Amino acid sequence: MIPRQPRPLLNNDFAPVTFRFGFIEASFRSLCDAFQEWFRTIDAKYPNLRREFTPITAPLTTALLSLEPLTNPSDRYLLVETKSNWTAIFANGLRVNDVTSATGYLPTVLNSRGLEVGHTPDSSKSNRKDLIRKWGSTLFSLYGPTKTDWLNRIRHLHVSNDDDGWTFDDGGNLQPFEETEAYKKRRIQDRFTLEMLERYCKALGIQLNEDGFYGPRGYEVRTTGQKQRGELTMSIAEARSHLEV
């Protein structure tokens, strides 16, 4: 039997949005309410900022388009219900797709767990001049409601590439589903792979890269009045044409 080849969410047709995203272990409705309350608190400190909250009912391939245009810093989130007790969170970052704040903070409000995941193909050696250059990485960061030795992070695994080469970083409490023998492999990229990320998520009840796991209800959270919005903006299709996936 030919082993199943790993397939990123939507085959990365919506990259870079699907390079990094997250989940909160909470119902769709309760997470939408928590987002509104969170931003009310933030907006009280920054009166120039405004938030727009828009319900969406659509397949994931349509809902993700509500994140356009992509820019940095991010100014939109998309919450998507799933066929589980987790709700997904996507953001519209062009170069850095940041969902760390949401997946780290909101579990402390909802007394739940948060998860940030990521898998980015490495294009650091490409000679393309038009490339949005991405360093390869695979990420799993699990958060909880209470303080740990590093904020409220329960477990962190990250294989990544940068100027100094590939590194493997881990911290927190070992989880029962982990494949610890892989962490000893000589080739660093093999210590934590997309296949392993999928299996770890499945152990938590998340069908990470299954299109049918997501939707149909979504909730767009849009920020306006953000002075630091980047000058460079792109549609998802435009951004993907500058990637190697």
Image (tube, rainbow, N blue to C red):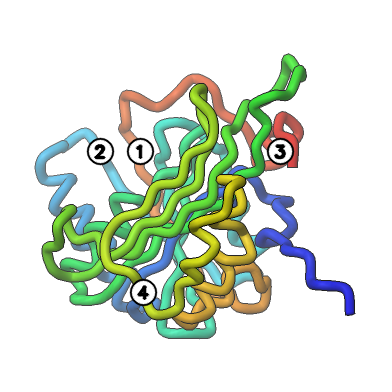
Q: Kindly identify which residue carries mark 3.
A: 240
Residue sitting nearer the eye, 103 or 78: 103
CB under 8 Å between callouts 2 and 4? no
**Type of residue at label 2?**
Leu
CB under 8 Å between callouts 4 and 3? no
Q: Which mark is residue 224?
A: 1
Residue 235 point in image, percent of width and height: 65, 37
Q: What is the crowding at mark 4: few (fewer than 14 residues within 10 Å), some, or many (at least 20)?
A: few
Q: CA distance from mark 4 to mark 3?
A: 35 Å
| Residue drawn at 28 percent across, 62 percent down | 35
Rendered view: 152 above or below 99: below
Q: CA distance from mark 2 to mark 4?
A: 40 Å
What is the residue that sits farthest to the right in this orientation?
Answer: 1
Q: Kindly identify which residue carries mark 4.
A: 175
Q: Kindly identify which residue carries mark 2.
A: 49
Q: Classify residue 44 by image quadrant.
A: top left
Tell me which numbered mark, 2 or 3, is placed earlier along the sequence: 2
Tell me which numbered mark, 1 or 2, is placed earlier along the sequence: 2
Q: CA distance from mark 4 to mark 1?
A: 40 Å
- Indicate the quadrant containing the C terminus: top left, top right, bottom left or bottom right: top right
Q: Dot 2 lies on which element?
A: loop
Q: Dot 1 lies on which element?
A: strand
Residue 171 point in image, percent of width and height: 30, 55
